[in-house]
Amino acid sequence: MNKLQSIAPDIFGVGESDRRLALFENLFPLENGVSYNAWLIADEKTALIDTADASVAGPFFAKLEAALNGRGLDYLVVSHAEPDHGALIAEVCRRWPGVKLVGSKKALELVGQFFTLQLEDCCMEVKEGDELRLGRRSLRFIMAPMVHWPEVMFTLVQGEGILFAADAFGAFGALSGNLFSDEMDYEALCLQDARVYYANIVGKFGPQVLAALKKLDGAAPVMICPLHGPVLRGEDIALMTEKYSRWAAYRPEEAGVVLAYASMYGHTEAAVARLAALLAEKGLRGLRIYDVSKTHYSQIIAEVFRCSHLVLASPTYNMHLHNAMDALVRDMAALNVQNRDVAVIGNGSWAPAAHTLLCKALAEDMKNMRLLGEPLLIRSAMKPAQETELEALAETLAASVRALLTSLAG
Ligand code: FEO
């Protein structure tokens, strides 16, 4: 038992980190792995809050056995049935045949889809506000549909302010011994991982996230336990609640410019670099340039959630956008990115289309994306005569950022 970490008396961490995984969901590059968090509450009844990914089955079951210390398992609360948390549900049922699966109607349906189990005998469907008494502790269930998937629910430990928040408030990155956000510099070490996680995994579902946050009004959690990343505690709860309310409303965190470009031979890149230099001359700070062929779009999407202003630049390729820019723009639309000010640069040697395609995507596939100035069209390479045009675009962008800074200061 003394090998286990706990977040409160008799609530033990039984999850594990995977530092080897290269692509989360076989899609998103991970620099530093990911944690799959799960918790065992050992009261008069025992309740496991979620399982984990199949890759960490060994340490997960070793910890769970240790936490149970020879006792049986009474409940498995299924906050989220996605396999990064639910892959071990069937094995839990096999090892503890009397366990009751506690979840929303949709969660139990999804468990039935993923596994072939005799669910009739072992399911306990719960609804909004239902409570489950374990003994000294009581759990209250809060439905949070589409805080990634439709079956998702939060679980609040009554009277203690411990919130098990499913994917909400999660972050990429393996844990490094410290479980709690206030045992590290969370803002410096984890905020970007949390932003990348939110934008790519939950970002599409802003209205549903806002609805779930509203249900937490008055709950005043003192500890938020996401399924990935550190447990939030102390000032980090306010920090992340504020970030979530911005991200979910598609409001930028700050007035600033992110410049994302595709470039085949360096000419589009040169125009973007020149534009960034002009913006710097005009006093803008914190500019960030990304080559979409080098930086995965999932990282750039997080920057789009962070910043108020964007520059998108692409050559024309097969009379369409460059593939890497196309992936970024399609993902922006898929994730419901909105409320941003955007400047556009297109390049084309013989049938230029990128500038019009970027404008069309912003106008037709996304909401409230405001085009700044005229799109700059480069024919193969920017010429000195276009410097005036670029200067005008830079001034329009800078003025827009300044106006936002002024309104935020007011
Ligand atoms: Fe971490 Fe939606 O699963």
Image: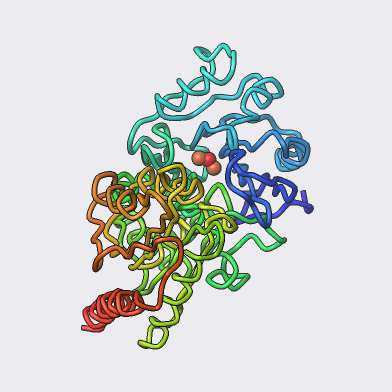
Residue 98 in the image: x percent, y percent? 62, 20
Q: Nearer the viewer, residue 71 or 156?
A: 156
Can residue 264 be seen at all in this image of the molecule?
yes
Q: Residue at x 25, y 65 (%)?
A: 374
Location of the C terminus by quadrant is: bottom left
Q: Residue at x 52, y 64 (%)?
A: 290
Decide: is 305 above or below 239: above
Residue 83 in the image: x percent, y percent? 58, 32
Quadrant assignment, res 386: bottom left
Can residue 165 be seen at all in this image of the molecule?
no
What kind of colouring is applied to the model shown? rainbow
Residue 276 in the image: x percent, y percent? 43, 77
Q: How many marks?
A: 0
Q: Nearer the viewer, residue 24 or 258?
A: 258
Q: Residue at x 64, y 52 (%)?
A: 30
User: On the rendered structure, is 65 left or right of 335?
Assistant: right
Decide: is 409 above or below 229: below
User: On the rendered structure, is 364 left or right of 381?
Assistant: left
Decide: is 215 above or below 312: above
Q: Nearer the viewer, residue 285 or 137?
A: 285
Decide: is 183 above or below 322: below
Q: Nearer the viewer, residue 363 or 55?
A: 363
Considering every residue shown, the one lying at the far front of the view is 350
Quadrant assignment, res 55: top right
Residue 41 in the image: x percent, y percent? 59, 43
